[in-house]
Image: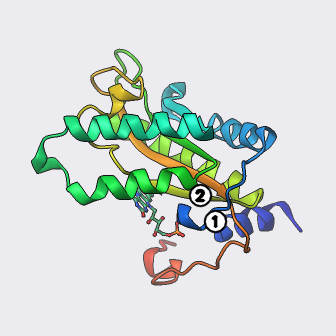
Amino acid sequence: MKKAEAVLQTIRERRTIKPKEFLQETISDEVMAEILESANWAPNHGKTEPWRLTVFTGESGIKKYTDIIEKVFAETPDHLKKPEKLAKWTGNAPFASHIIAFGVKRTENCALPKVEEVCAVSCAAQNMMLVATAHGVASYWSSGIAHMPTSAAAFGLDGEEDQMLGFLHLGLVHKGLEVGTRKSDVETKVTWVK
Ligand SMILES: Cc1cc2nc3c(=O)[nH]c(=O)nc-3n(C[C@H](O)[C@H](O)[C@H](O)COP(=O)(O)O)c2cc1C
């Protein structure tokens, strides 16, 4: 298969798979190293490399993750949260082999608009999901508590403009990754100017 075809196939095959479908098996260190390495090659404006990743694994690592989200949830004012969500997030966590909490570290005195750093970290997340897919590892991007006021600090991002973007739940699955759907072809979202 040609390189471009293989990349497009991996992009198409990437699917969000809910943690409850994960096997209770651990992703190897070698595969995790490749997934993490891919994050570091995301495009970024001004060479700021703003992605910061915290990897939780093993029973005690995942417990530390749920402890953090429970604490952040408790610190969040009622009008910014739906009480039923916490149980969903803490319920998903133990099914994951690894959870990568990922966020934006703003460079000090950086003139770039923050949205550009958010874009770069999102690219890092997509890189990780694609390498995971290529290894047959399922992924699930949960926003969870990402946008709650004390979330970034809870994951060690203590700058005023630092921000969490999500929690990538990774796991092995039995079946092949499902075929995805899109509401419409890309042509309906493209304008050509010739
Ligand atoms: C920024 C972002 C945040 C997301 N947050 C959640 C989430 O909190 N919960 C969830 O179930 N899925 C979340 N997802 C995954 C989407 O639900 C999923 O990508 C979408 O259903 C399309 O399915 P696909 O990933 O298989 O193409 C998120 C995806 C992105 C890009």
Q: How far from the left and from the top, in percent, is residue 124?
A: 57, 43
Extreme-left residue of the structure = 79
Mark positioned earlier in the residue sequence (1 or 2): 1
Question: Which quarter shows the N terminus?
Answer: bottom right
Residue at the spot 58% in from the left edge and 78% down from the top edge: 180
Between 116 and 164, which is closer to the camera in this rendering? 164
Q: How far from the left and from the top, in percent, is residue 68?
A: 38, 34
Quick check: 59 left or right of 177? left
Which color scheme did the rendering employ for the protein? rainbow
Specify the label residue 33 is tagged with.
Answer: none
Residue 43 appears in the rendering: no
- Say how many tags the image has: 2
Residue at the spot 30% in from the left edge and 27% down from the top edge: 161
Residue that numbered label 1 is attached to: 14
Q: How far from the left and from the top, in percent, is residue 175?
A: 73, 74
Q: Is mark 1 within 8 Å of ligand 1?
A: yes
The amino acid beneath tag 2 is: Ser
Q: How far from the left and from the top, in percent, is residue 39?
A: 62, 39
Residue at the spot 47% in from the left edge and 84% down from the top edge: 184
Extreme-right residue of the structure = 1
Task: Give the quadrant of ligand 1.
Answer: bottom left
> In the displayed structure, would residue 7 be above or below residue 107?
below
Quick check: 161 left or right of 100? left
Quarter location, residue 77: top left
| Disc 1 packing (10 Å; few <14; some 14–19; many ≥20) | many
Residue that numbered label 2 is attached to: 139
Residue 194 appears in the rendering: yes
| Disc 2 packing (10 Å; few <14; some 14–19; many ≥20) | many
Quick check: 102 left or right of 29? left
Identify the element where label 1 is drawn: loop
